Image (spheres, grey):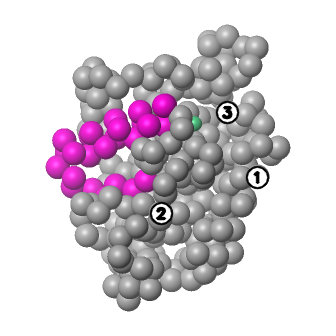
């Protein structure tokens, strides 16, 4: 973690203050219907169906509630994620679950066409992601933190990072965490979002991934994370992020 503490970030106005709806950024402060409102396009990338939802579903819900556009990019369709099902069957089930989750979060899904458990990092895949992201022209990027036990999470992180570099680092890049300690590791947040008001929608979106048994397994971990990050931030429940420190110096856009 950098030497910048949360206290110093607060004094610099980088981190939102306590309480849902609080913000230090003009574009977020502007009401949806006011002329000052600037609609952001937020793109959240993840290796599998359920990663963007579990890592930042509460933040996504806050963005869409504020009238911003959110696109979720799934690198794979979770082909390897259901025991006893073929890749095709699992992909169909998990695609349907993703569509439902996106509907709950009011986000638009995109599937990048890689295979769960066999993601590739090569020039063809870097080019493919670059084209997808270039066509979307996001104004804020979120992706998985690169130090993670799952190769597909690492792949998603690297592919988005490569786009960000090639596109001139012109938008904010944030990393999110999933199953802290188990999957994401060495994650020391720089930014927090109070999700107390949107956790219920996050929960619904995560629970849409029925095949992944969220209620008895990984969502419990995320509930613990919400509380710990909430304690760190000074609210009941929070999600945490690491902002790439070469992002444009604007803080967390919209929040
Ligand atoms: Zn995953």
Q: Please name which of the two marks, 1 or 3, marks the residue nearer to the observer.
A: 1
Residue under label 3 = 97
- Residue in view at x 62 percent, y 13 percent: 87
Q: Kindly identify the residue that appears in the image at 62 percent across and 45 percent down.
A: 182
Residue 180 part of the magenta-drawn span: no
Along the polypeptide, which appears first: circle 2 or circle 3? 3
In reply to whether residue 163 is colored magenta, the answer given is: yes
Figure quadrant of residue 191: bottom left
Q: Pointers 1 and 3 in contact (CB under 8 A)?
A: no
Distance from the alpha carbon under mark 1 to that under mark 3: 19 Å
Q: Position of residue 101 (x, y in %)?
A: 64, 42
- Residue plotted at (69% across, 75% down): 236
Q: Quadrant of the C terminus?
A: bottom left
Identify the mark at residue 188; answer none if there is no mark.
2
Q: Earlier in the sequence, mark 2 or mark 1?
A: 2
Which tag is nearer the camera, tag 2 or tag 3? 2
Secondary structure of the residue carrying tag 3 is helix
Q: Is residue 174 above or below residue 137?
A: below
- Label 2 packing within 10 angstroms: few (<14), some (14-19), many (20+): few
Q: Nearer the viewer, residue 176 or 62?
A: 176
Q: Which residue is mark 1?
A: 220
The foreground one among 98 and 189 is 189
Horizontal and vertical percent position of residue 254: 41, 68
User: Which residue sits furthest bottom?
Assistant: 11
**119, above or below 69, in the image:** above
Q: CA distance from mark 2 to mark 1?
A: 21 Å
**Disc 2 versus disc 3: distance between alpha carbons?**
31 Å
Q: Nearer the viewer, mark 2 or mark 1?
A: 2
Q: Is mark 2 within 8 Å of ligand 1?
A: no
Q: Quadrant of residue 120?
A: top left
In magenta, the rendered stretch is 151-175
């Amino acid at each position: 973690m950098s030497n910048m503490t949360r206290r110093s970030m607060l004094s610099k106005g980088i981190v939102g203050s306590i309480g849902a709806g609080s913000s230090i950024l003009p574009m977020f402060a502007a009401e949806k219907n006011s002329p000052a409102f600037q609609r952001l396009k937020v793109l959240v990338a993840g290796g599998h169906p359920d990663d963007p939802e579990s890592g930042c579903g509460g933040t996504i819900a806050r963005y869409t509630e504020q009238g911003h556009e959110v696109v979720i990019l799934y690198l794979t369709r979770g082909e390897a994620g259901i025991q006893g099902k073929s890749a095709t069957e699992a992909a169909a089930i998990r695609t349907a679950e993703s569509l439902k989750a996106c509907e709950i979060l009011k986000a638009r899904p995109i599937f990048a066409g890689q295979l769960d458990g066999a993601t590739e990092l090569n020039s063809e895949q870097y080019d493919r992601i670059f084209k997808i992201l270039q066509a979307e022209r996001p104004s804020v990027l979120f992706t998985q933190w690169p130090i993670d036990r799952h190769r597909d999470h690492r792949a998603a992180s690297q592919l988005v990072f490569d786009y960000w570099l090639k596109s001139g680092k012109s938008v904010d890049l944030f990393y999110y965490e999933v199953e802290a300690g188990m999957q994401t590791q060495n994650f020391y947040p720089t930014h927090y979002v109070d999700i107390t008001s949107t956790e219920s929608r996050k929960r619904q979106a995560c629970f849409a991934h029925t095949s992944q048994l969220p209620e008895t397994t990984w969502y419990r971990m995320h509930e613990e994370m919400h509380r710990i990050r909430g304690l760190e931030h000074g609210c009941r429940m929070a999600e945490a992020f690491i902002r790439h420190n070469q992002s444009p110096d604007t803080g967390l856009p919209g929040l």
